[in-house]
Amino acid sequence: MAEVGGKKMKLYGFNNLTKSLSFNIYDICYTKTEEDRKKYIEYIDEQYNSERLTKILTDVTNIIGANVLNIAKQDYDPQGASVTLLISEEEVPLYVLDPSCNRGILTPTRENIVGHLDKSHVTVHTYPESHPQNNIATFRVDIDVATCGEISPIKALNYLIGSFDSDIITIDYRVRGFTRDIDGYKHFIDHKISSIQDFIDSETLKKYNLIDMNIIQSNLFHTKMKVKDLDLNNYLFEIDEENLTKEEREDIIKQLEKEMTEIFYGINI
């Protein structure tokens, strides 16, 4: 079954539509010294290690109504982590499950693990980095969720936004392929959408400036989000705002806004 135009529709065979959600978040921070920049990256690396990321992706899998077939995860040196889940829309019986799949059961002897869903997958990669010529440090998380069948990754969008400190968010959502109804008629999408913003919580929307670039006839949707209010205390690492002069505070805010603007618009200014 699928839902097109608000009506349930009988399909001929499996729902072959592929729904892909790519989600990138950026967390910006001001670090005064080289030592503080290293500490910030170490802090981020610890906060968003592969274990925590695995928990987030497992929650995503549950939210969209899928089942974990396999999980692979890795922490990198000097920093960064990656997790991949293979998932399935329906639970796969043990006698069918490939021996390489761990069903999300991680053992101490397996340091590298990949997660899979049946016909679907979820991945996450982290990228902590700092500017070579100023005191700005940036942490980026890339998450990709691809599903087929009736489940859709867009259901987990609000959970993902709430799982990270998100100053800049870029979201791409695309529906690929087609599925047929019992009369042989092709359907290129099985749910109503005009913008990714349709699926973002209203309270979250109030906190961001947003830009949409959509090609609706191709079922391709893109949304960028930039936080509106900049509370300096939320961006200082190992620094107390009270110990800064007015000129220092203004300069730091200027640097932070420049970094966010460049990322948001994808240009150097």
Image: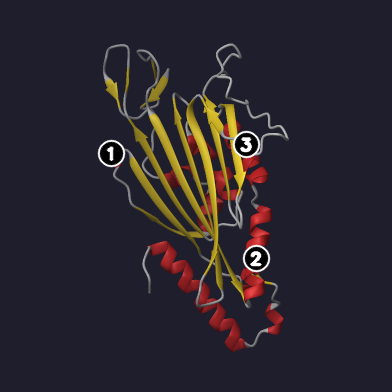
Disc 1 from disc 3: Cα separation: 30 Å
Mark before the other along the chain sequence, 1 or 2: 2
Residue at x 38% of width, y 49% of height = 222
Residue 59: x percent and y percent?
62, 36
In this view, which residue lies farthest toward the right? Answer: 108
Task: Give the amino acid type for the residue marked by disc 3 in the picture.
Answer: Asp
Q: Nearer the viewer, residue 252 or 41?
A: 41
Q: Which residue is mark 2?
A: 40
Q: Who's the residue at 52% across and 37% down the image?
A: 122
- Mark 3 vs mark 2: which is more N-terminal? 2
Location of the C terminus by quadrant is bottom left
Circle 2 packing at 10 Å, graded few (<14), some (14-19), many (20+), is many
Q: Amino acid at mark 1?
A: Ser
Which comes sooner in the sequence, label 1 or label 3? 3
Kindly identify which residue carries mark 3.
59
Q: Where 257 falls versus 149 (above or below)?
A: below
